[in-house]
Image (tube, rainbow, N blue to C red):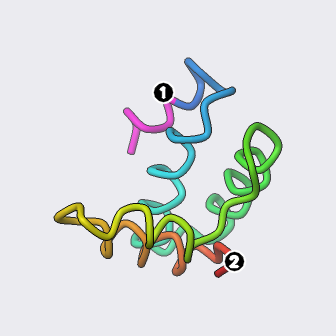
Amino acid sequence: MPHLRASVAADAEFAGHYNALISCCGHLGLRDEATEFLARRNRVGPPLRVSVLRHSLRHFAHGEVFAEGLAKAGGPD
């Protein structure tokens, strides 16, 4: 996770870095941290929707694992 945190710090205006970080926080049970990053992420891009990302990543090998982490982090469906 240090590398994901560094990515967010280096380019705080790119929502994709936040998505990965939020998913990891969800899998690790870091709900408070995920909530903070979710709020920051939604200020720089369209609001995160787990269902939208799940659909977009449906053909990727780990797309469901990624979406599951977002859901565990409290991302809205």
Crowd rating for badge 2 (residues with CA inside 10 Å; few <14, some 14–19, many 20+): few
Look at the numbered disc 1 and give the secondary structure of its residue. helix
Disc 2 residue type (three-letter): Pro
The foreground one among 30 and 57 is 57
Find the distance from the CA under tag 2 to the CA under tag 1: 25 Å
Q: Quadrant of residue 1?
A: top left
Q: Position of residue 46 (x, y in %)?
A: 75, 50
Residue where numbered disc 2 is placed: 76
Is 40 on the left or on the right of 29, as rendered?
right
Look at the numbered disc 2 and give the secondary structure of its residue. loop
Q: From which residue to which does the magenta span run?
A: 1-7
Q: Is residue 15 above or below residue 35?
A: above
Q: Residue at x 64, y 58 (%)?
A: 33
Is 61 on the left or on the right of 4, as rendered?
left
Is 11 on the left or on the right of 46, as rendered?
left
The secondary structure that dominates the magenta segment is helix
Residue where numbered disc 1 is placed: 6
Residue 9 shown in magenta: no
Q: Is residue 9 above or below residue 23?
A: above
